[in-house]
Image (tube, grey):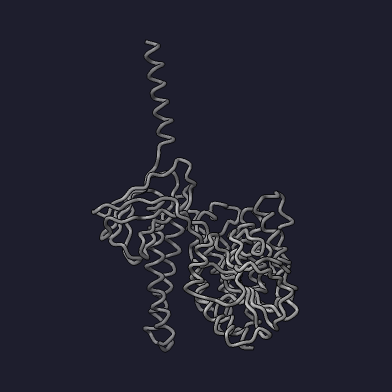
Amino acid sequence: MKANSAFLIVIILFGCIAATYSQHTINGSINGLKNTKVYLLQVKGQSKSTLDTAFCNNEGSFTFNLNQDLPVGMYTINTGTNQNIELIYNNENIRFVSSGNSAEDNVQIVESIENLIWYDYLYTKGFNQYKMEVIEQLLMSYPPGDKYYEYTENYYQNLQTNISSRSKELITNNPNTLASRYIKVDMPVFAPYGLSENDKQKYLIEHHFDNTDFSDTLLLRSNILSSKVIKYLSLYQSPSYTKQTLEDELIVAIDSVLNYAIVEQKTYEWLVDFLLKGFEAIGFERGLNHIAEQNKLSELCVNTDRKQSLERRMEMIKKLAIGKKSPDFTTKDISGDEINLYNINSEKTILIFWASWCPHCTEVLPVLKEYYERESREKLEVIAVSIDEYESDLMNYLKDNPYEWINIAEFKGWDGPTAVKYDVHATPTIFVLDKDKNIVAKPTNKAGIKKVLDN
């Protein structure tokens, strides 16, 4: 009897352990989608990485079997079209149906407490904000003082209340969920009605992060904090600002948001990296240099790999800033001839890092070619450094798109010596050098190149 009881206890314990470590699934059904692949992507800030692929059957159904160690956080299902179905994973099964495979189609959560809460919030926010946007346009053109104007104003404020009250209700009723933490940060901030535009802007800036816990690192496994930061930076912008004023305001915003984030090292490191990538993409050199000079990475206690990487990057930003002498290099071009940067005697030298697989590069290179063929070598030289890894890829591209300037290829990808020396992380990366090889500009697109070369 005792043996049987012990055996029964073992079975029960085994069952409990198995249930604890059971594999969770995401089951979806999308109307109109059939016999195609769907993708599971992990969301980190504004970046998404593909984790898995499932095949959608003839009825639009598919299943992802999730790894037991899959981190909690935000994920999306991509259907290969413009539809991205946002989901929160927190160690539970997820089941949903979608009315179609476009971005406008509705998603209904069938199973998953987290996503029932999250989609309640998303629908409440989206439905009311849509009405608010329509009303804002109406109030801008309607004469104040009219009874209808007053009625519409009140209705507009009620829409704001709908969002705020439902958001707070969901947070209060579900305090231990990941969804409630995301909602608390994501919920819109509304300024008191009747403020001037200037006072409204000040209020929104002052209260933007009231409900944001920068020490909550789970926010980094979503797009919640990154979207919040982007919105915050936008509050410092105005169409009436000059370029100088806009940059001044953005510097203030950068300092402010970094001060918020210093409470948690992981958040601070993420934010510095996020801002650097964003400013590099738009060519905001002053912002990059400001972060490089004023960051507080040295105050962080733990010497993480990411911290070391960021510190090295800061040094490179300073080294490659506009006005600095460009690093010299000696290498061979694709014909085997030795090339030394400082031996180039043109008044201007364009140093461009590119790749045959880069779509933005194929937009920029023809523009450069026009100027190159128009100018003498005394006036302009172009050094194009390919980061292609395979010689065949580069040579096939150049066969179809011949460029007679100096072509360099080290076939080591991002790890090529010249690319490393210039801290290249994206293509195209462009440096405009004067006759003394000082960096005078770093355009990011063809419009920027035209502006530099037309002067």
Q: How many marks?
A: 0
- Left or right: where does residue 120 sit relative to residue 408? left
216 or 423: which is nearer to us? 423
Quadrant of the frame with the N terminus: top left
Q: Residue at x 26, y 57 (%)?
A: 34
- Is residue 230 shown above or below 72? below
Q: Residue furthest left?
A: 59
Q: Residue at x 36, y 83 (%)?
A: 148
Q: Quadrant of residue 22?
A: top left
Quadrant of the frame with the C terminus: bottom right
Question: Can the viewer see residue 249 in this picture?
Answer: no
Give x and y (percent) for residue 202: 60, 74
- Left or right: where does residue 296 sit relative to residue 356? right
- Is residue 79 shown above or below 453? above
Give x and y (percent) for residue 365: 54, 76
Question: Can the viewer see residue 398 in this picture?
Answer: yes
Give x and y (percent) for residue 60: 27, 55
Q: Residue furthest top?
A: 1
Q: Quadrant of residue 121?
A: bottom left
Q: Quadrant of residue 12?
A: top left
